[in-house]
Amino acid sequence: MTAPRVQYQTSDEVDFVIIGSGAAGGILAKELSTNGFRVVVLEQGPYLHESDFSHDELKILQEDLLTNHPKLQPNTFRKTPDEKAKPQRALVYGRAVGGTSNHFTANFWRFHEIDFIERSKVGPIPVPRSAIGHHLRDLEPYYTKVEWEVGVSGLAGASPFDPPRSKPYPMPPLPVKSNGVLFERAARKLGLNPFPAPMAILSQPRAGRSACINCGFCSASAVKSKQNPVPSHP
Ligand SMILES: Cc1cc2nc3c(=O)[nH]c(=O)nc-3n(C[C@H](O)[C@H](O)[C@H](O)COP(=O)(O)OP(=O)(O)OC[C@H]3O[C@@H](n4cnc5c(N)ncnc54)[C@H](O)[C@@H]3O)c2cc1C
């Protein structure tokens, strides 16, 4: 369920101000606001409508139609703290309400059990690394909640390496495209086990959102089948 959208005055007091409306900020804003907090999200990019998207690969990939522009939102980069930071394209992100989820490919994987217990199984490694510090069973209910809210398409149990799950995916996998058919055939010949990737793209219509049209250019999809943390993306 989504809380009704509220517009606050600059003089209003709120509980949280979130900078950026991507997968992290957008979902946090939704969870906080539906739990009764007063939340303001500040987003530097525009609110895009379906008609603002184009399937023009040059505009999207070369002219930064959906992403940060190197001149307007420059990144600077240095290899050591003593160097002077120079402008360099270090990061590409979606610059719009909904953030990079406007531009991502929407593969929607879960971590495997081993990812949480690498040190116990494989032993310590010499370079310092951050530890996740949890077990898959701690996260499993949240993976399931997100998959069902977002509408992830996939085939539970199709991968022999799939970790245990409490619920199947909410809808069947997307159809395999012609290059995928060839890939599957070749992988099977090699004795491998190809399976459809879980995707945050609807294979069936759901709650006012249309199903994927299988255009093959997910990085610029304007069809509401693709997950976006802004719930009523018009
Ligand atoms: C081409 C591409 C394909 C990808 N494919 C996949 C995939 O298939 N599967 C997967 O899991 N991940 C994929 N990713 C990665 C994934 O999309 C990102 O990790 C994720 O969307 C990041 O979410 P976020 O909320 O951390 O940041 P973002 O979604 O980048 O959100 C940051 C937001 O903050 C805004 N912002 C930044 N600075 C300011 C400021 N000063 N003031 C106001 N607003 C500001 C930005 O405009 C942006 O909207 C892909 C990424 C790219 C670029």
Image: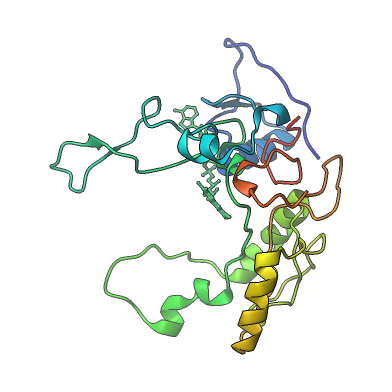
Residue drawn at (62%, 81%) of the image? 186
Q: Position of residue 119 (x, y in %)?
A: 41, 77
Visible residue check, residue 163: no
Residue drawn at (72%, 31%) of the image? 50
* Above or below 216: residue 69: above
Colouring style? rainbow
Q: Is residue 71 rendered to the left or right of residue 116?
A: left
* Above or below 216: residue 51: above
Q: Position of residue 62 (x, y in %)?
A: 46, 38
| Image quadrant containing the C terminus | top right
Q: Nearer the viewer, residue 188 or 12?
A: 188
Residue drawn at (53%, 67%) of the image? 134
Visible residue check, residue 21: yes
* Above or below 203: residue 53: above
Which quadrant of the view contains residue 187? bottom right
Q: Is residue 97 rendered to the left or right of residue 222?
A: left
Q: Position of residue 59 (x, y in %)?
A: 53, 34
Which quadrant of the view contains residue 53? top right
| Image quadrant containing the N terminus | top right
Q: Position of residue 31 (x, y in %)?
A: 68, 41
Q: Nearer the viewer, residue 54 or 43?
A: 54
* Above or below 7: residue 93: below
Residue drawn at (37%, 82%) of the image? 123
